[in-house]
Amino acid sequence: MKIKRIHHVAIAVNDTAPLERFLVDALELAPPHRETRPASNLEIAIFPVAGSSIELLKPNGQGSQVPDFIKARGEGLFHICLEVDDIDAVMSELRVKGVRFKSDSPLTGHAGTRIAFLDPATTGGVLFELLEAATAA
């Protein structure tokens, strides 16, 4: 199994403004790219950082795990996304090692990516996401 890189780190927040100010003003990152994901009721602010990114996830109601996460744990690190070449092969290899997933097969993510979330009960309590980049058509 080969992990290519940390694709992004996602942070769950109720309000993106305070952390955005820190990232732009203190760390001098470029202003974020913004996305709205209606299916999951999320507003996302994406800050590119040296070939990776920091994503701020702000829930706008139910539809994802983010509101429940914030309610239970407070704002903070939500997940770490690892990019892989072949998500099916990585999932198979991890299953042999006893790792469970939140879904049986990869889901469709942003921009045609394929994603899968690992069950935190098998990862020491941390939510990891695997991501296979979309293939060029």
Image: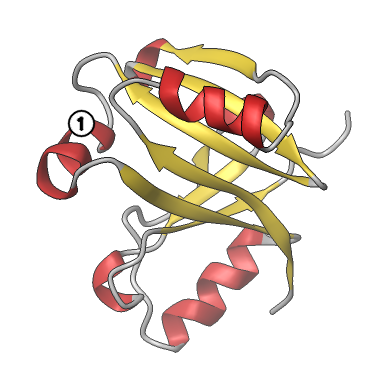
Answer above or below: position of 116 versus 17.
below
Q: Amino acid at mark 1?
A: Pro
> Taking 39 as reference, is 10 left or right?
right
**Does residue 58 sit above or below 120 in this rendering?**
above
Residue 116 rendering spot, x and y as whole percentages: 47, 52
- Say how many tags the image has: 1
Which residue of the protein is positioned furthest toward the left in this rendering? 72
Q: In front here: 15 or 24? A: 24
- Name the secondary structure under disc 1: helix
Specify whether 67 is left or right of 85: left
Query: Quarter of the image containing the N terminus?
Result: bottom right
Residue drawn at point x = 55 percent, y = 80 percent:
93
- In the figure, is residue 125 to the left or right of 136? left
Which residue appears at 28% of the width and 31% of the height? 64
Q: Residue drawn 25% across and 23% down?
A: 63
Q: Residues within 10 Å of mark 1 (few under 14, many from 20)?
A: many
Where on the picture, by quarter, is residue 114? top right
Image quarter for residue 133? Answer: top right
Residue 51 x/y as whole percent: 81, 47
As rendered, which of 43 and 76 lies closer to the eye?
76
Residue highlighted by disc 1: 67
In this rendering, would 130 be left or right of 25?
A: left
Q: Name which residue lies at 48% across and 31% down.
A: 56
Quadrant showing the C terminus: top right
> Picture coordinates of residue 32 (x, y %)?
65, 20
Which residue is nearer to you in this view: 51 or 31? 31
- Furthest residue in direction front, as rendered: 26
In the image, residue 103 sits, relative to residue 98, either above or below, namely above
Q: Quadrant of residue 109?
A: top right
